[in-house]
Structure formats: C-alpha cells, structure tokens
Image: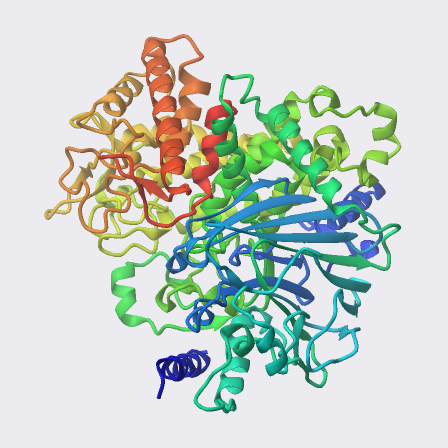
Amino acid sequence: MSTKARNLVHLLVLLVFSTLVFTFELDFDDLDLEFSDGNMLKPSNNKLMAIKASNNSLLWGTYRPNLYFGIRPRLPESLMTGLLWFGADDYKGFWQMRHACDQSDELDEYSYKKHDGRSFAMQTITDIKNNLVLKTEFLKAPGGENGGDWAVRITGEPIVDEVSSAISFLYYFGLEGEGSLDLLNDPDKSGLKGPVELSGETPELGKFRIRVVEDSLNRMPRIITSTDLNKYPNDLKKFQYWGHLVPDGEVWRAKDYLNGMFTTKLSNFQPQNDAYPPPPFLFALNNEVGENSNFFVIQKMVDTPFQFDIFFESDSSPAHIDDLSNLLKTSSRDFDARFERTFGLSEKGFEKDHIYFAQAMMSNLIGGIGYFYGSSIVDKSYVDDVDKDEQNLEDKREADPQLTPPASLFTATPSRPFFPRGFYWDEGFHQLLIGSWDNDLSLEIIKNWVSLIDDNGWVAREQILGEEARSKVPQEFQTQYPHYANPPMILMAICSFIERLNNVTSFTQFNVEVNQDQIALGQLSSTTDPEILPNRHLHDPELAKGYLAEIYPKLRANYKWFRRTQWGEIKEWGRKATSKEAYRWRGRTPGHTLTSGLDDYPRPSPHPAELHVDLMCWVGFMARSLMRVAEKLGKDDDIEDFTKQYKNILANLDDLHWSEEHKAYCDVSVDENEESVHVCHKGYLSLFPMLLGFLPNNSTKLGAILDMMHNPDELWSPYGLRSLSKLDEYYNTGENYWVGPVWININYLALSSLYTNYASKPGPYQSKAKTIYKELRNNIINNVYNEFKKSGYVWEQYSSINGEGKRSHPFTGWTSLVVLIMAEKY
C-alpha cells in the first residue's frame, strides 16, 4: 500500500471514531407584568412599541459565540447558520476542521475588532497552520416586521503569499422547529453555478431568501490540474452542496454530521490503482439533497485570496442590501466615531494602538453575546434542609437531578472557547461596559437574567441551557442547586443605569437631536433610528420607570431569598453583634467556595459556625442598591426596610468581621473549643468593605486597607493587585486560581471605589487614595495592553510575578473592563 493510501486509511479510522463519539412574536394584548404583591401592570402603548422596536433591532446577531462565526435569531427554534473551514492541501487537513472556538486549534488570534451589538461587526481570525487570515463582517439592515435583512462577507488572505493555501470553505444553514428550507438551484451532481440560493419560511421569520455569492476573482486551489478537472465527477469550479434531515436541537452538531457524511463517502470510495484523488476532490461534498432536508451545507474549494458574500433577505423588508462594500466601510467609520464619542480615549491622550486595543476588547465582549435555549439540570433535594449542617446532610440525602422546563437567555459570556454560557456574577461586570456603550442592549440582557429568578427568589449561578451548552461543561459541574447563591453584581449594572438616567440632560451627548414633543407623542418608543435605539430608556421617563417597575419584584424576591437561605449564626456561638445580620455561603467544600466566585480563596474549614465577610458585604450592597430602585419607584415602605437593614449590616460588619489584631476584615469560624475566632487571609476578601464603598472617608480601617493594598509584600504588584497577600501561606499554591494571580474585575472595583469614594473627596486618606489610584490604573492598562500586543489575546488572569496572561483566552468578559478604566467611566 502506498504512503498516500495508508494516510487515507488512518484518516478513515479517525473519522469513524469521531462519528461514534459523535417568541419573537409577542401577543402584546396578553403581556402583563405581575408584581409579587399580586398587582398587575398593563404596559402602555409606548412600552409595547418599545418592546417591538427592540425585538426587531436585536432579533438577528452573532449570537453563537461558541463558534468562530455564526448567525442566529433570538428565537428558541429557528434558522441557525455557521462557518467551517479546513486546509485542503493534504489529507490531514480535514480532521483539523474549524468550527467551535477551541484553544487546541492553536489559532494565532481570533478577535472582533469592531462590534456595535446591533448592526455591524468585523472579526479577524489568524490560522497559521492553514496560512490563512480570515475576516468576517456582518451587516444588518433594519426594517420590516421580522427583523430585517442581514449580510455576511467572509474574506481570506494568505499569511505568506508564496505558500499554497488550498481552503475548503463551508457555510451551513439549519432550520429547527416549524417551517421549510429549500434549495432553489437545480440539482447537479457536478456542483452548482453561483449564486447558490435557498428559500424558507417560518411562523416567526415569515418568508425569506438566502444567497451565497462568490467573488469573481476567486480561484481554485493551485494543486488542482486540468487533468484532475476532467478525471473526477465533482467540478470544483462550482459550489459543492449537501442537504440532510437533522432532528430539532441537533444543528449545533454540524461538524459531527459532516464527519458522518465524509466517513460514509470514504468507506464507500474505491481507489483506482491504489491512487486517491487530490484532497480537494476527496473532501468535496457529495452534491446530494436528502428527503425533507432542513440542513444545507455549501462548500467551495478555493485558494487565497478569496471572498464570499451571504445575503439573508426577508420578504417583509422594504428594501434589500445592495451596496455591501460601501455600507461596510461607512459602518466601520461610524463605529470609530461613536467609540470616541462614548469613551473619549483620543481626548485622554491614548495613541491609535491603545484605541485599537480598547475597541477590540469591547467588541469581543459584545461579540460574546449569545442566545441560549434549553433545559438545565437542577437538584432540589437540598431545599427543605438549607438550615442544617451541609456536611452531615451530604451523607444522608439522595441526589435527585432533574431536567427543568426549557428556558431562554440572552447574555454575554466570559470566554468564547472555555465559558460560552451565562454566569450570574460575571454578567454584572459585563453590563457595566455594555451599558456604557448601548444602554438599551444592556437593559435587555439584564431583563433576561431577572426573568430567570424563580418564585422562591433563586437564580442559578451558571446557566447551562441545552445539550450544546452542556457539551462544554464537565458532568460534575452541570447540576445547579437552589440553595446556592452567587454575588449579585447585576445590581451594580442596574445602579449604573440609574446613574446614567440621572445624568442625562439631552440627546446631544449621543450626537442625536430629539425634542420633548417626540417623547410625549411616543415617537421615541417606536423609532427604529439606529442612533436613538441604544438610549431610548435614558430619555423617556415612562419607559425608564416602566422598566424598573418590571424588574423590581423579582430583584426584591432575590434579596429576600439571600437573607432567608444564606443566613449565619451569631448567638449560637456566643457572638455579640448589633443585630442578627450575618451570612454564610452555602455549597462550601474543603478548599473551595465556588458560590462566592472566589473559588479556591482560602477560607476556614466548612462549618455551620462560619460567617463570610464578602457575603455580608454583598447582602448590604443589595439592600443599598434596591433602596435606589425603590426611590425611583416611590416604594416608601421598602425604602424604610432597606435602609434599616443596610445600617444593621454596616454595624455587624465591624462587630463580627473586623480583626483588630490583623487590621483587616476577615471571615469568622470557631476553633477546636468552639470559640468564635477570626480566620484571616489578607487579599481580595479583605477589601470588600472598601470595594463596595461602605467605609467612611475618615475611617482608620480605610487607612489600614489602603496600606495593605499598596504594600509590595502584601497585595501590590507592578501588574495589579494580587488576589492573596504575598505573605499568606497559601500564596501561589495549589490550583493557584484566586490565591495570587491578578484579576481585572476586582482591580476594577478597587479603582472605581478609589476614584468615586476616596480620591475625589476630602479626608485624611485622600492623598494616599489618589496615589494608589493613579499607579494602579497605569499598571493595569500597561500590563493588559502589553500582553495583548505580545499574544494577540486578553486573558482570564495575569501573573503577579511577571504579568503574563494565564488560563483561558480570549477572555473578554470582565477583563474588558480595562476600557472603562482607560476612559475613567466608573
């Protein structure tokens, strides 16, 4: 057997193995908002028009963030599209097919350089193994009743011109749920002359047409000879295609289905004289359409450079996209201008390279927004025993994980390859930046999260909805428990919205002219103007108040759930405190408190007597935040309750958690004699009263915290604040996750609090706060920027020893807060 034939046999075995392991339309008349007290709020016409305008504007998007590129609508079952590619220069290229973001693909970079969240996006992907730089561009044209039209341009350039780059370009369209999808071109076993056209119809999208258009300058791979063209049935000058019936809920497995198709093709292939055709012919689609096909893959074998345009055209659109090149150029320029208006980085003295870096960070965060739908796994067997000793309960209970009814979530994600799903405390950080860019997009995402708070007030800290999401999560982490909490950072994003609302004076700051008559007549609510859509709720008091009224009952229920399920014990262990306010994270295991978000940060051994200082601060933060929402809504009784509880928490914070011996806020537990003791591990945990702005400007405790922050032997490093003191016995040990490395989210909170609460206000520590703020801001910006230039990525965390980016990448969740740090928008 020849070497070429032997390679093909090996490839066939690999393919067989891989295969084996293998409403939008709202009924507005029925839309009621139910409050927990039983009252009903019937939305006004303005509100209904606003909902409809928002749904149209945000229906389509790059809402498949786990893929290198994919488009879908915010609908549970509908049309989904995606890009795949592989090298076709040799027989090994196929099993390195790119589809879902994967760090093992070892791409040099993939990064949205511009993304406005609504109508325009541009991404570059550098694939060194295939000598390829891909650029994906997305453009959406609003209009019509069903979300309007959109277009995609995908171009490929060689990294090294002299090197052949045969590429198999594939793009698929899969329809789930009710409707039809059909190929309009006449079938041809040799392939299809372009453009390739499909038509479809669904109840939500109406009728639509899809076109795949090839640039006239595209050429076949250089390895193909004229003899090859006459020898094999596939005419590679044409598009190749494949239509298949895929069950609902399975389109996400597009790569697996392609593997299966090629496995069948190769197993049936009969080589002539022990000779296999060149890879572009061997790995061409079979040009067949199965009965009732709802999944179509379009393929073109090309050499670099190449370009393809894909158009989705709704029958309800008044006009279709007809000058894509100019529209993309205009959208790119508009993005640059809007970015500078919003963040003012050029005005602050940043050079082009830094602005490019900031644009990429924000764009990647927005490019990580996804729409998810499906069931999650919840184990409710703990619910009736939340007040008992979890360590004993663990041995007695019987696990009972159950699939929940399907739910949907529109959310940003921390990391496209590693965490492509929603995380509750991460999302609050995400929305600080997204809200600064597009207020109403952020409000839509926040509302989606709030809708998941159940009747008891609980929301799962990690939203793993459907089989696609579960495929990226180890089985032991898939089950959620309804007595497990997570930091309620989403309230900080809501308070940021209120702050923006209070500070808006006119539309001129958004480069838009709107008068009060337009607001009074409801024209602002129904507008589709892309300049107005991002900020409607900031200029329409009715919309803003209606939004807060809609989300408030569930936020209040979540607060009550925290107080009911995460309470801690005081008098049981002989402790003295001003009130009964004390809290303990549930879901603790030895060495980990995943529910706190600080995972492996050192804590006492799990015990019912524990009290956790960060959780006490989070509950106090909830009380203060809900107080602000209640003030907007005129909820006087609630304001009184929140105020009292907040004051009690501040008092108990000092009574229970301040250690005079360590000059730090600490967790509390008991010793071997069951006497209450402070368990102190200086680090992020010790900072929470300052991070959340609880400490007065003249507090000596503030002075002690600032000393700890600025001490190189404690938290200070040239790359940001360490998560754990350098003097702590656990510093940089074990998993080394939250025990030393620098995390941008906590550094952002530190900078925000210093800037807002301490550096800008007179007090004995103002000068020190100013110094720390200035130095810390420079350290964070410089290190994250330098690592981006070096690696092409922003990272989950950074070494406190040398500043090197660590763990998952790209991690454009809360690390993208560096944009706000640069802009000093806190």
Q: In the image, 441: left or right of 792?
A: right
Q: In the image, 581: left or right of 268?
A: left
Residue at the image position 16 percent from the left and 37 percent from the top: 728
Q: In the image, 251: left or right of 353?
A: right
Considering only vertical position in the picture, is 542 above or below 485? above
Q: Observer-nearest residue: 814 or 117?
A: 117
Residue 804 placed where, x, y %?
29, 39
Q: Observer-nearest residue: 545 or 601?
A: 601
Say whether residue 466 is visible.
yes
Residue at the image position 44 percent from the left and 25 percent from the top: 752
Q: Residue furthest toward the front?
A: 227
Quadrant of residue 186 within the rendered picture? bottom right
Residue 322 placed where, x, y %?
81, 49
Residue 7 placed where, x, y %?
37, 79
Considering only vertical position in the picture, is 249 above or below 458? below
Residue 434 placed where, x, y %?
57, 38
Q: In the image, 499: left or right of 583?
A: right
Q: Observer-nearest residue: 732 or 317?
A: 317
Q: Observer-nearest residue: 152 or 623?
A: 152
Say whether residue 582 is visible.
no
Quadrant of the image containing the N terminus? bottom left
